[in-house]
Image (spheres, rainbow, N blue to C red):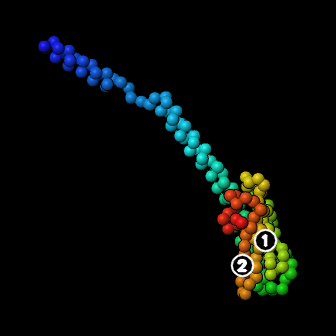
Amino acid sequence: MISMALSTSSDRLQKLLHKLSKEDGFTLIELMIVVAVIAIIVMLALPAYAGYTIRTKITEALSLANAAKTAVSSTCQEDPTITALSVQNSGYYFDQSTKYVASVNISGPCTLSVITIVTQNTGAAPSPTLTITGTLGEGNMTFVCASDGPNKHVPRTCRT
């Protein structure tokens, strides 16, 4: 009986030592599952991030157009009879293209002015052209933006 008790306690001691000496870690299959989950998350996030960066580049064009909108608005409120807006009569001149904006042009009469912004190197294929149309009202100008690019690439204010 005593030998049986010693044998039982010896077995328990061996099991305890085995548990203590066993190295804990991750199995290969667990690591592969983690890598697969990370790959799926990256695969889903990358297109959203790419669309965001394109929209950011195109938004630069809208910020550059603010100066043109101000020039058109003040020119047309001073003389609403102008039939052909230009660089000379509006006082706005876009002299140097930026990394993402090729040109900003003003045209049309004061009653329906048009500001055209041509983008470049935005990552969209093709880079969209933004058209801001101004309508002269009673003492103010109202501007509406439109684009020839897909809605996913242009800022919300220019989506059709």
Which residue is found at the position 24% from the left and 18% from the top? 11
The percent coordinates of residue 69 (x first, y second) are 74, 74
The percent coordinates of residue 154 (x first, y second) are 70, 61
- Which is more toward the observer, 113 or 4? 4
The quadrant in which the N terminus is found is top left
The quadrant in which the C terminus is found is bottom right
- Whether 108 is drawn above or below 122: the answer is below
- Label 1 crowd (10 A; few <14 / some 14-19 / many >=20): many
Q: Is residue 89 visible?
A: no
Q: Kindly identify which numbered label has been placed on residue 142.
A: 2
Residue beneath label 1, please? 115
The residue lying furthest to the left in this view is 1
Describe the element under mark 2 as helix, strand or loop. Answer: strand
Q: Is residue 95 visible?
A: yes
- Whether 26 is drawn above or below 8: the answer is below
Q: Kindly identify which numbered label has been placed on residue 123.
A: none
The alpha-carbon separation of the residues under discs 2 and 1 comes to 12 Å
Q: Is residue 131 left or right of residue 51?
A: right
Which residue is found at the position 67% from the left and 63% from the top? 155
The percent coordinates of residue 91 (x first, y second) are 80, 76
Q: Amino acid at mark 1?
A: Ile
